[in-house]
Image (cartoon, grey):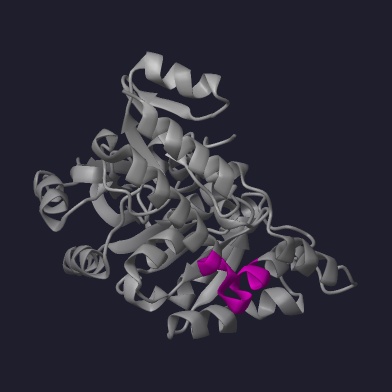
């Protein structure tokens, strides 16, 4: 019974069906009809002009996005818990050809204008210091919390005042939108580029890189090719994205994942370390207690001393979720 990550989730049948339907001769790379239709599809979804590139991984999406926003001699401000800081093996620095990640704090993995301003103001504005050029937000965060539209707008406003570009790592943006009950447009006001996650939410092997300044996409297309991420049969990647957007499947899947996490949160109660606002939970638990859960067949990660992480996904079996909730509630 896997609660390790939403990466373990199965692929939604609609995604496989869409790939099968795309299995016909078409133009290669991103010249096919499905790839060319992505700009209009996302422009309608967000209510403003967007240029969209499919990407094979979230790491590639984040790194190429930041390379389009920040020069090699610049800096990207992000939270200390951010995926680009802890889980991408230096890919942002590699793809930007050396841009520095500048680490800000903030409770529950969320930066605030105050924490960002404090970091930036401490950097002397001279040729000897790396100057911030971009701000990267993770929504939902790595600790399962979310930035509200007002939070994003406030940080984006600060970035604009400082002349920075704004990136959002949205590997779990669907979970954030479902929790908040807002629209995609409301949650991305002021954002220049969004890494729109699908793989964790029922997709197979494709994320979307959404540029709200289409001029930035021209540079990113060349970086995607140079980095080895331009697939020769891009129609199969685009087909996955269209399938997830059809009938709001991406939202339905996120709603199921969040609902499963909420059932676990209700059982965990005082053990919770952070608010449960998406599909991740962090619980206080002794090694003996964690071992007792594993003995019952539940799989999960130890996050730090005395803390475990549980992650639900769109297809988490209800019986397994309920069994884990009961097992947690039964702990002394």
User: Does the magenta portion include 152?
Assistant: no
Question: Total number of numbered labels?
Answer: 0
Relative vertical location of residue 36 with respect to residue 85 in this rendering, above or below: below
Where does residue 109 sit, x and y in percent of width and height? Answer: 27, 45
Does residue 252 appear anywhere in the picture? yes
Q: Which residue is drawn at 43% across and 59% down?
A: 175
Where does residue 210 sit, x and y in percent of width and height? Answer: 49, 69
Foreground: 230 or 140?
140
Relative vertical location of residue 29 with respect to residue 272 in this rendering, above or below: below
Q: Which residue lies furthest to the top in this view?
A: 288
Relative vertical location of residue 70 with respect to residue 320 in this rendering, above or below: below
The image quarter containing residue 222 is bottom right
Where does residue 154 sit, x and y in percent of width and height? Answer: 18, 67
Q: In this view, does 149 lie to the left or right of 29?
A: left
Magenta: main secondary structure equals helix
Quadrant of the rendering where the N terminus is positioned: top right
Where does residue 259 sit, x and y in percent of width and height? Answer: 44, 56
User: Does the magenta portion include 242?
Assistant: yes
Foreground: 36 or 260?
260
Foreground: 92 or 246?
246
Foreground: 225 or 113?
113
Q: Which residue is drawn at 56% across and 56% down?
A: 201
Quadrant of the rendering where the C terminus is positioned: top left
The image quarter containing residue 297 is top right
Q: What stretch is highlighted in magenta?
A: 241-252
Does residue 87 appear anywhere in the picture? no
């Amino acid at each position: 019974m896997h609660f390790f990550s939403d990466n373990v989730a199965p692929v939604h049948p609609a995604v496989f069906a869409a790939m099968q339907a795309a299995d016909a001769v078409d133009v290669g790379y991103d010249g096919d009809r499905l790839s060319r239709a992505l700009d209009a599809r996302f422009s309608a979804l967000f209510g403003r002009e967007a240029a969209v590139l499919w990407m094979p991984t979230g790491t590639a999406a984040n790194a190429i996005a930041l390379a389009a926003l920040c020069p090699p001699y610049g800096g990207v401000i992000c939270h200390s818990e951010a995926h680009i800081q802890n889980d991408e093996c230096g890919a942002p620095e590699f793809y930007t050809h050396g841009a520095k990640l500048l680490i800000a704090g903030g409770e529950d993995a969320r930066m605030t204008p105050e924490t960002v301003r404090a970091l930036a103001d401490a950097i002397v504005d001279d040729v000897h210091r790396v100057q911030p050029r971009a701000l990267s937000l993770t929504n939902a965060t790595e600790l399962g919390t979310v930035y509200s539209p007002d939070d994003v707008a406030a940080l984006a406003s600060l970035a604009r005042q400082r002349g920075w570009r704004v990136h959002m790592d949205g590997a779990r943006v669907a979970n954030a939108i479902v929790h908040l009950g807002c629209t995609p447009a409301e949650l991305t006001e002021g954002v220049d580029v969004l890494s729109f996650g699908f793989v964790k939410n029922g997709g197979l092997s494709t994320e979307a890189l959404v540029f709200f300044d289409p001029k930035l996409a021209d540079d990113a297309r060349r970086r995607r090719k140079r980095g080895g991420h331009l697939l020769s049969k891009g129609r199969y990647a685009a087909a996955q994205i269209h399938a997830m957007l059809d009938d709001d499947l991406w939202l339905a899947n996120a709603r199921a994942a969040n609902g499963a996490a909420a059932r676990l949160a209700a059982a965990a109660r005082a053990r919770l370390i952070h608010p449960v606002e998406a599909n991740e939970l962090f619980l206080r638990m002794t090694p003996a207690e964690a071992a007792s859960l594993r003995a019952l067949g539940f799989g999960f990660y130890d996050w730090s001393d005395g803390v475990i992480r549980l992650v639900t996904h769109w297809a988490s079996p209800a019986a397994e979720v309920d069994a884990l909730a009961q097992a947690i509630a039964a702990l002394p």
